Structures are given as structure tokens and as C-alpha cells.
């Protein structure tokens, strides 16, 4: 689905969402439910400027007198790996964006990421993984780190990582693998109205992060939930 198709399916009555410099901003209404919209388009890299603008929009939403959900539409490459952005402290800009989304969730705004294209590395972490619930459309192609990059960091041969990726989802990029680990809550059906799927997601109870439990149920992260539970239990008795 194109971004125009997605917006039309989400907001059949119309919307006020605009795109400037591959950054998405605006709002729409689904069955009398107002929805704030931000995001990245055009599979563009997320640099300091874009992260700062998006974070500012989230803070503006938080200052408003509502708790309407925030929909984050995502089609990006990775973070912008330029000398300028690195010297300006890109990691801090990305962390700031992620923290504004976490703050919005804590202030009562459901934050829902919709991955409809690509995303990788810091851009993926600061947008998609920073939302309270992440869903995707078929054809999305996320990666926390691709295998060639992982090989450079770990110094393991690419063949070894490919073998591990074939059996261990946490080593592998891609929609199916990230859904299996629980990072992606659900893959929406593009043949059904996205508005109704969005409302169905809003009807699910908000609250604690269930990604580790989803990963355990789906077999993608069999140990994360039990280890987190053990750490929490032992910390409470320390």
C-alpha cells in the first residue's frame, strides 16, 4: 500500500495529514476518535533535524488538552550516517525522540507505530520500537541491524550469522522474524479497512509492555519473559 492508500483506508472521511521533507504530520478522525499522526516517509534517513522536528511535534501533542492516540507512520532507511549528524550528537537526538514517545504513552496517549515500508538501526529504535504498540503491513522490511553490519560489529563470518538467522529470529532482520520475537504486535490485513483494525487495537487494554511474553508465545524469544520476571522478583526482595 502507498502512503496515500494507507491514509485513505485509515481516515475514509478525510484527514489533515501533510508531508514535508519526508516528515509526516497532521491529524484525522476515525469514528469520532481523533488521532494525531506523525512519521517518516519515502524510506528516508532520520537525522538530527528530522528527529528534533518529530520530537517537537510529540511534545506539542502532549501539551494539548487531550489524550488522543498518536499514530506513527514509518517508512525510513536507517539513521543519517553523516559527519555533521554524528558531530551534532545524533544518538542524543534519537534518544530524545524515543523518550518523547515514551512520555506521551505515560501521559495517557496510546502510541501506535505502523510500519509500512523499511526501517533500520537507530531510526527503527527511535520510532517503531519506541511506540507502545507496533504493527506492520505486509511488505514492510524492518531490521534492527542487517547481517553485514552485524558481521562487522561481532567479527563473526557472515556465513555463521546467516546460519544462526535461519533458526534464531533474534539474529535475523525481516517482518516475520521481528513478529516472532514479539517486537511487532500484529500484521494488519491491507484488504480490510485499516480504520477498523486501528479501532480494534485501541480496544485492547493498554499498559505493560507485552513484547517479551509475545516472543515467548511465538517461540522467537523463549527466555526473555522468564528472565525479566526473575530479575524483577529478585530486585523487589533486594
Image (cartoon, rainbow, N blue to C red):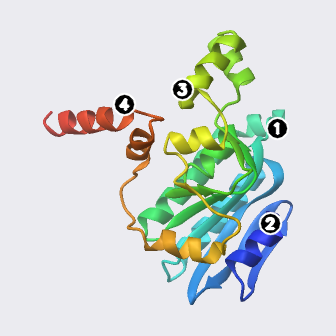
Q: Residues within 10 Å of mark 4 (few under 14, many from 20)?
A: few
Q: Which residue is mark 4?
A: 223
Dot label at residue 168: 3
Q: Examine the image and state in which quarter residue 158 appears.
A: top right
Q: Secondary structure at mark 3?
A: loop
Dot label at residue 84: 1
Among the two numbered marks 2 and 4 on one chain, the one whose residue lies closer to the N terminus: 2
Q: Nearer the viewer, residue 191 or 124?
A: 191
Q: Residues within 10 Å of mark 1 (few under 14, many from 20)?
A: few
Q: Nearer the viewer, mark 4 or mark 3?
A: 3
Among the two numbered marks 4 and 1 on one chain, the one whose residue lies closer to the N terminus: 1
Identify the residue at image location x=63%, y=85%. Answer: 29
Does any portion of residue 236 appear in the rendered image? yes
Disc 4 from disc 1: Cα separation: 40 Å
- Point out residue 83 in the picture as x, y percentages from the top left corner: 82, 33
- Point out residue 26 in the picture as x, y percentages from the top left corner: 72, 76
Q: Is residue 43 above or below residue 80?
A: below
Among the two numbered marks 1 and 2 on one chain, the one whose residue lies closer to the N terminus: 2
Identify the residue at image location x=77%, y=53%. Answer: 49
Identify the residue at image location x=40%, y=65%. Answer: 206
Among the two numbered marks 4 and 3 on one chain, the one whose residue lies closer to the N terminus: 3
Q: Which residue is mark 2?
A: 3
Disc 3 from disc 2: Cα separation: 32 Å
Q: Nearer the viewer, mark 3 or mark 2?
A: 3
Q: Secondary structure at mark 4?
A: loop
- Point out residue 209 in the picture as x, y percentages from the top left corner: 40, 52
**Quadrant containing the N terminus in the rendered view:** bottom right
Q: Residues within 10 Å of mark 3 (few under 14, many from 20)?
A: some
Q: Residues within 10 Å of mark 2 (few under 14, many from 20)?
A: some
- Point out residue 183 in the picture as x, y percentages from the top left corner: 52, 45
Amino acid at each position: 500500500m502507498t502512503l496515500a492508500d494507507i491514509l485513505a483506508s485509515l481516515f475514509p472521511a478525510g484527514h489533515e495529514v501533510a508531508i514535508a521533507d519526508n516528515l509526516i504530520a497532521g491529524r484525522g478522525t476515525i469514528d469520532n476518535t481523533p488521532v494525531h499522526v506523525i512519521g517518516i516517509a519515502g524510506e528516508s534517513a532520520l537525522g538530527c533535524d528530522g528527529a528534533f522536528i518529530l520530537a517537537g511535534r510529540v511534545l506539542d501533542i502532549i501539551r494539548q488538552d487531550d489524550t488522543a492516540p498518536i499514530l506513527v507512520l514509518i517508512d525510513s532507511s536507517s539513521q543519517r550516517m553523516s559527519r555533521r549528524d554524528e558531530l551534532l550528537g545524533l544518538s542524543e537526538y534519537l534518544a530524545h525522540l524515543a523518550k518523547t514517545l515514551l512520555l506521551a504513552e505515560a501521559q495517557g496517549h496510546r502510541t501506535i507505530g505502523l510500519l509500512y515500508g523499511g526501517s533500520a538501526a537507530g531510526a527503527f529504535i527511535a520510532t517503531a520500537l519506541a511506540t507502545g504498540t507496533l504493527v506492520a503491513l505486509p511488505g514492510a522490511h524492518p531490521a534492527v541491524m542487517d547481517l553485514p553490519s552485524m558481521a562487522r560489529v561481532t567479527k563473526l563470518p557472515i556465513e555463521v550469522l546467516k546460519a544462526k538467522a535461519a533458526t534464531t529470529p533474534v539474529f535475523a532482520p525481516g517482518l516475520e522474524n521481528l513478529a516472532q520475537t514479539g517486537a511487532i504486535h500484529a500484521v494488519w490485513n491491507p484488504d480490510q479497512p485499516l480504520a477498523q483494525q486501528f479501532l480494534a487495537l485501541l480496544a485492547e487494554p493498554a499498559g505493560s509492555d507485552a513484547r517479551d511474553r509475545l516472543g515467548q508465545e511465538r517461540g522467537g524469544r523463549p527466555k526473555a519473559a522468564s528472565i525479566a520476571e526473575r530479575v524483577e522478583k529478585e530486585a523487589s526482595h533486594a
